[in-house]
Image: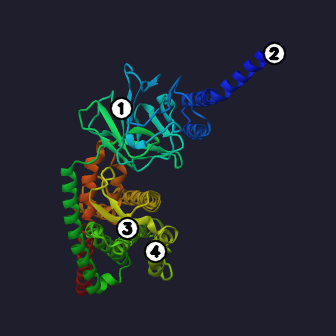
Amino acid sequence: MQRTKWWLLWWLLLYLVSHNIGYDLAPCMKDLSDTLKRGRIYNITEILLDLEDLLEEVDVDRNMNMSFPHVAFLLQKPNGPFKGLKIQASENEASSERNIPNARVNVQLPRELDAGPKNAIAFCLLTWPETNMTTSGASDELYENTMVGLSVRHKKISGLQEPVNITMNLNIGINEIRVPRCVFYNVTTHAYSSSGCVTLWERGQEHITCSCDHLTYFGVLMVSAPLTHLDQEILTYISQIGCSLSVIALVFTVLIFITNRKLREDVSMKIHVNLAVALILLNLHFLPSHIVAAQSSNGLCLYMALFLHYSLLATFSWMALEGFHIYLLIVKVFNIYIKKYMLKLALVGWGIPAIIVALVVIIDRDAYGRVALNSSEPNSTAICYIANDIVKVVTTMGVFGLVFIFNMIMFGLTVRRVVSLHHSKEFGTIDFDRAKRDTCTLLGVTTLLGLTWGLVLFSFGSLTVPGLYLFCILNSLQGVFIFLWSVMSLRKNRKSATVSVTQSTKS
């Protein structure tokens, strides 16, 4: 009798040890379920990593299904040679052995996984309340707040020749503004990425298939609809023609400045010419960039990307200096003499961009390279530019954002000054000539301050296509507008000189 008790205790101990996976996973799944209710993405990331570590450590001797609120989990142990696996899942259930009514997700795992008895396959379907979802800087919406996790114990699956196919039902209508894109969640960077995944979806379909070459946590982002090929082609022609015309106009602007002594003495015109030179460099490096990117020379592409970045930053710098000069003329007015004024402006306008580019090269030379114009199509036309997204955002959008805000303030001061001059005149009369001159002045200031570049900040949602057309037209022709401004300044100087001569003759 005593021996029987010891045998029963030993059997119970063996049973608990051999089935400890259920006891280990259940608390982890419960924590994951509670975290999903709160929608804390960072906590979710930590629990997902803990779950992966747990799956690597425990011994798996059986298949397992678990269901908690917002979590459906399946652990499948292959028996015999692996021939692929199909998994269906709803919000509350996952199975590889039978069809599930109203399944939201269907997964097809390829034979290439080559999972054996020690390589348990883990599947989990994660959902969470929409109102509680918080992400790290994600501007796009994750479809139905759903992620599908896939992993194989003791294996790191990537670079598959035969992809993993994850099919999800689409229960909402897709409009012209937003479309679905397959992504995975990077638990290291807390960001979504589409690398290694192909989106198989056509407008009108009620399902989407994500075909990926690795295993991780997948989802579908609702992103801004990409431009049609016709729009891309038209915008390309607009940019090429506009930039070419700008280069010609800007060269004439510089020649007019060099050949006219009166203009060479004008400090404002000196600043305009520096901006013109920066735009010439920008256009000369932008126009052939796609041709250079199509070639195999990495060194030439690095040079093109580096100087394209430098000339873009120089353009922003001189736009900001145009705003600073307007501040001195309109706000300060008196006592605006600065010793070696143009030398100091040149050090800022050309020096700061050089420092930024030099720091980028020192920190990460690979930040420059070939970049596809359409990120959703890696094989689309590429240019030589900034390949690192963080560098691109900080050193271009960040810098331009500061310049744009400053110049908008300067433009507001200019408008206020013009309006105050009108109010100082006698009421009851309208001077159409003066109104026309003031309008031209404000348009010229808008061009010099680069305010039209701000259209890119409003190119979202339904404004995407119209905003991009306006952006390409106005900014590609910025050099032409500066040329017209220079010609008007030249005529104004000549007219002033003629009036002064006439008055001295009469006296």
In space, the residues marked 1 and 4 are separated at their CA atoms by 49 Å
The circle on residue 312 is 3
Q: Is residue 86 above or below residue 504?
A: above
Residue type at mark 2 is Gln
Q: Secondary structure at mark 1?
A: strand
Residue 15 shows up from this direction: yes
Q: CA distance from mark 4 to mark 3?
A: 11 Å
Front label number (3 vs 1) = 1
Between 441 and 158, the residue placed more toward the observer is 158
Q: Earlier in the sequence, mark 3 or mark 1?
A: 1
In front here: 462 or 163? 163
Q: For the residues carrying marks 4 and 2, which lies nearer the camera in this image? A: 2
**Sequence-first tag of 3 and 2:** 2
Q: As shown in the figure, which amino acid type bears the numbered disc 1? A: Met
Please give the residue where the numbered disc 1 appears in the rendered image: 168
Q: Which residue is mark 4?
A: 354
**Residue occupying image coordinates x 52% and y 46%:** 190
Q: Secondary structure at mark 3?
A: helix
* Image-based side of 67 in relation to 429, left or right: right
User: In the image, 347: left or right of 443?
Assistant: right
Q: Which quadrant, please, contains the N terminus?
A: top right
The residue under the point 31% across, 81% down is 263
| Mark 2 surroundings: few (<14), some (14-19) or many (≥20) residues within 10 A | few
